[in-house]
Image: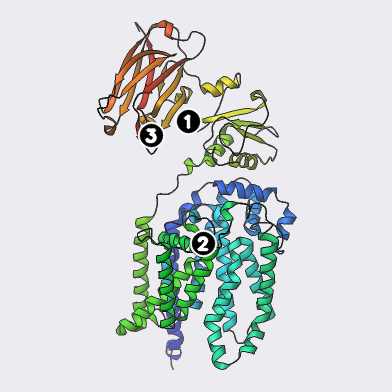
Amino acid sequence: MLTTNQEYPGQLLIGTARRRELTLVAILVIVFMSFTWRGLTMFFSTDDLMNMYNAWMTPALKLWKAQLLPWMPMSRPLGNAAYRVFYTIFGFQPLPLYVFCWLLLVGNVFASWRFFRVLAPSVSIALVALTLTLVHGLFQDLYLSAGTIYDRLCFLFTILAVTFYARARQAEDGMSARRIAMLCFLVLMAMNSKESGAVVPAILFCYECVYCLPGVLREKRVHEWIRSIAPLYCLMAGILAAFVIGRVRRADGLLSNPNYQPHLSLDFWLKSVAEYLSDILYHRVQFSGNTAAAVLVAMLALAAALRCRAMLFGWLFFVVAITPVALISIRTGYVLYVPYPGLGLYCAALAGLVVRFALPRARTVATEEPGFAQSAAVLTVAALMTCVHAAFWPNPWVVRDSPAWRLTDKMRNDYPTLKPGARILFADDYAWANGYDTMFNLRLLYHDPLIEVAKLKGAAVLLPGRSLTEYDHVFTTGLDSYVELDRRDVEQSIKLNVLQDYLPGRHFDSNRIDHAAYLVSGFLDSGRRSAGYWTTRSATLKFDIYPADSRLKLKFWLPDDEVTGLGRNLSAFVDGEVVGTAALIHSGENNADFAVPAHAINASGFTILELNVNKPYRKDNQEYGVVLSEAGFDYVGK
């Protein structure tokens, strides 16, 4: 009697190949996770603040209606709904949202695998295509900011729509009403995710022309073919028209934003595509508009000459998917996320043909289910791509450098509650150039849309017509965070950087926690607090000292490239009176000691020390003096 294995050898072979395929996919997913896991550790980005606040301020009913009504003038309702749900359930906590967004990326890897599996001529080529498009070093916004949730969702529904459409067209019963409804839903969700989802119907039609139309023409079934697909494309055309006319043209801040204004020019499109092709190759090859056109035409001609449907569809997928972003202002690399699979499919299919025709003995590598040779080939490509991307992978973002993290950490620790509608003034702000982000941050943190935020820096949020005494809190930057200014005399506190919790004395030391109380203006972060602070051409500190004869002692550091022999000097002024000058002729640690007469010290307020460098070192349009680590007044005789 035969054993089970002897009875079904073909099934065993298929089962083994399937397990090998799933093992390879699992390995690729692990590689993807190893590159992108830091996304789980991030804090809200500035895009997150704006997106979450807008979603919170949008009436819930309107937000949910927009999911099914493409003509409603609301931009990207699907991603905004995700922000609304996570804020409602978890509050101002980044981890749940970032876990979801990371899992969405992981899920997209599996969706890509199914996409390539349906379109590629073999399993091995599908796995190579997945390997080629698995990660990219210039997609950091995609991996580290939940603000790209719109791209992640658009990718998912675009890939699902193409995969579902391909399977439906391969099915014997064709485009049933249920399949048409599902495809219309997927197309609508792609559009709800991002405006570029509007090209999904065109991508589906490209599949139709590449994979289905040649057989129709051979069998002369054109009328039957038109009748079979007409209901779907009529419905998708209606959804697209409603989307463009009702939503894209009427959504607030979309077409009125110059960054989203389309430039309907072939020259503009080619220059944008050239920039994005350069991004894909990490700018090791720099494309121009002409070279991009030549490459695209050559790729199309090669696909046609080889009569390879996968290559042709991959080319069309890339060109159609990149068009919406290539007609607007250049973005960072993450906008290539949706078009990228087209290039992967093209290159993998071409590689398969090269193996098949150039290496006859290795022909099975490109045609059969993954055996040992095919698996080795896939793993080799994966190893090479991993090395390439690892070599160009940028340093991870530092969460503590985020203005949102600094502000949230400060307020949660020191101000767990604020009175409703609190008025807050920022004399300085780490995010002062980022518009309303500070306001979004505070309103979301305290769940209070009435909090008022004003700034003394930046053009987007201006100081309202209130007196300085009307603000409940006045903050500035310091101690790598935010610190509150003394409100007894707000005008003086802003002018001299008088802190509420720390007051200056006689000795400034950059290693002490109270060092920010001494700084007034003209200082730059050196990158390490223990090293001190860079002064600019003129830097000012304040001290609270008794008016007696003293000695001013300075400790500062001078790098080698600043010792130029050009007669550079450091001059010290105490309340406007020069007390000494030191020549900047020695690199490394320097010390200066100047006599300060009692009459130069302010007896009724802060004593101001001004340090001037007559010929500051210039780099990147910034002036640098010395790196000051200590400054202090010692009374004579002590």
Q: Is residue 112 above or below residue 445?
A: below
| Spatial separation of the CA atoms under disc 1 and disc 2 | 43 Å
| Amino acid under disc 1 | Leu
Rendering coords of residue 5 (x, y %): 43, 87
In the image, 303 versus 452, the foreground residue is 303
Rendering coords of residue 210 (x, y %): 52, 81
Rendering coords of residue 310 (x, y %): 46, 78
Task: State the scheme by which the image is colored.
Answer: rainbow
Secondary structure under badge 2?
helix
Q: Is residue 128 above or below residue 176?
A: above
Identify residue for label 2.
326
Q: Is residue 223 above or below residue 464?
A: below
The numbered mark at residue 479 is: 1
Q: How many labels were placed on the picture?
A: 3
- The answer to which quarter of the image holds residue 434 is top right
Q: Quadrant of the N terminus?
A: bottom left
Q: Is residue 110 left or right of residue 587?
A: right
* Residue located 37% across and 56% down the image: 392
* Residue located 55% across and 69% down the image: 159
